[in-house]
Image (spheres, grey):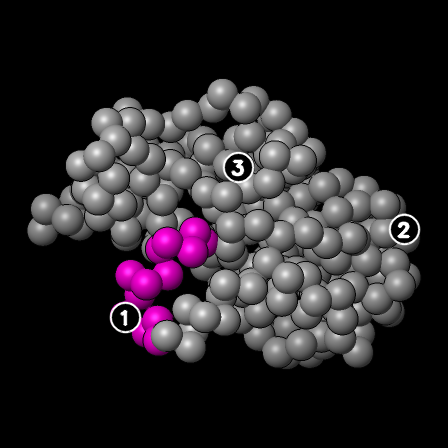
Amino acid sequence: MKSTTNSGNIMNRYLAVLLAFGIVACQPATDDATETIAKASVASSTADGDGLAAVLDALPEEMQARYQYRHPQETLEFLGIKPGMTVVEGLPGRGWYTKVLLPYLGSDARLIGADYSLEMYPLFDFATEEFLEEHQTWTTDWVADAESWRGADGATLAAFHFGSMPADLIGTADAVFFARVLHNLARFEARRKSWHGKCCRWANGYLEESVRDGTRVKTGDRAVSWAR
């Protein structure tokens, strides 16, 4: 009971900050949309709202079946995400929102995938040795996979793990989009602080760390800290 209460308090503490980046409901992964990305990229060349609608209309039916639950047009418009931006997508998974964002943002934009810290993955019950080994190369593997979805006119790509963001990304993003990240960051927050608190008074939890990176990549503030 105590653990559940702590996780709720942690979530509430950062919710207002994360809304500034962009948070929407959790999304499971879906199948590849490679064959339709080129058509969607062409569709995005009109005015922002019409362009996004055209992109969404061009994506596969299995993706469109989820629109009634995820409301991608309303979500991206509400968050002010527009073509030409540099956007960080937290935990892109197998790319449901990635396949929307790549053609919509366009060739003048950049989409940066951000995955959980490598230190966090062993905490999951399903994390086998093979799974953990595969995630060691996630930053290059995800970019390679997403390249096959972007078509000729999609956004360029980069990737990093929370807690190890490259310095050259600081201050480069226009928006940070957390679509399916928060629940597990909060779930393991107290455990991370317990470990690091033994040796470091100002230890950050996983949620704090991701918010810090999200703030730094957007504002360029190298001194941001979410330690207590």
Residue 184 lies left or right of residue 133; in this view the side is left
Closer mark to the observer between disc 3 and disc 2: 3
Task: For marks 1 and 2, give the CA distance.
Answer: 46 Å
Considering only vertical position in the picture, is 217 above or below 133?
above
Find the magenta span and give its range.
116-128
For the point 65% across and 37% down, the residue is 169
Task: For marks 3 and 2, give the CA distance.
Answer: 30 Å
User: Is label 1 in contact with label 2 (beta carbons under 8 Å)?
Assistant: no
Residue 60 lies left or right of residue 89; in this view the side is right
Q: Quadrant of residue 99?
A: bottom right
Which amino acid lies under the numbered mark 2 shown in the image of this protein? Thr
Point out which mark residue 125 bears.
1
**Is residue 205 something one can see in this rendering?**
yes
Which amino acid lies under the numbered mark 1 shown in the image of this protein? Asp
Q: Quadrant of residue 154?
A: bottom right
**Residue 118: in magenta span:** yes
| First in sequence: mark 3 vs mark 2 | 2
Badge 2 is on which residue? 46
Q: How dense is the environment of label 1, judged by Cα within 10 Å: few (below 14), some, or many (20 and up)? A: few
For the point 37% across and 61% down, the residue is 121
Considering only vertical position in the picture, is 118 above or below 219?
below
Task: For marks 1 and 3, give the CA distance.
Answer: 27 Å
Q: Position of residue 146 (x, y in %)?
A: 70, 65
| First in sequence: mark 1 vs mark 3 | 1
Question: What secondary structure is found at the residue carrying circle 1?
Answer: loop
Badge 3 is on which residue? 214
Considering only vertical position in the picture, is 71 above or below 215?
below
Q: Nearer the viewer, residue 214 or 9?
A: 214
For the point 9% across and 51% down, the residue is 1
